[in-house]
Image (cartoon, helix red, strand yellow):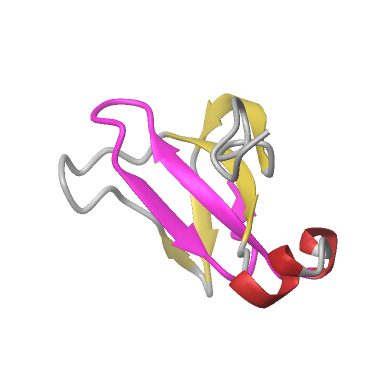
Amino acid sequence: MGLFGKGKIFDSVQKVTGAHSYRIQGKSIVCPHCGSDRFEQGSALLNTAGMTFLNLDWANRQATILNCTVCSHVQWFLRPPDMC
């Protein structure tokens, strides 16, 4: 199978179901595109070429992603935001 085999791109993405509001450092997170405050939370590995070459993707850092439920804009956070 090649580098871009079926399912390879999204294997490291996990989704938490349900739309919620979130805060980080005491400030509410809003979508910069539509202004909504409802997001679905997920996580993704921050893959690097070296770790992928060594087949050590599991050792890469993980980011929290928030997907706007209205316009689908995605925001990335290195620290997980707090759910309101």
Q: Residue at coordinates 61% horizontally, 64% vertically from top-left?
A: 46
**Residue 82 falls left or right of residue 67:** right
Choose between 51 and 58: the one closer to the eye: 51
Q: How far across and how far down the image is residue 51, in percent?
A: 74, 72
Where, quadrant-wise, is the N terminus in this rendering? top right
58 drawn magenta: no
Q: Residue at coordinates 67% horizontally, 32% vertically from top-left?
A: 16
**Looking at the picture, does residue 56 appear above or below residue 14?**
below
Choose between 38 and 5: the one closer to the eye: 5
**Residue 32 falls left or right of residue 48:** left
Q: Residue at coordinates 37% horizontally, 46% vertically from top-left?
A: 74
**Residue 51 falls left or right of residue 24:** right
Q: How far across and how far down the image is residue 73, in percent?
A: 29, 41
**Looking at the picture, does residue 23 appear above or below residue 19?**
below
**Looking at the picture, does residue 48 appear above or below residue 80?**
below
Q: How far across and how far down the image is residue 17, in percent?
A: 64, 24
Q: Residue at coordinates 83% horizontally, 65% vertically from top-left?
A: 56
Residues in magenta, as a range: 60-84
Query: Total of numbered circles in the picture?
Result: 0
The outermost residue toward the front is: 1
Residue 69 falls in image quadrant = top left
The outermost residue toward the left is: 33
Q: How far across and how far down the image is residue 57, in percent?
A: 77, 61
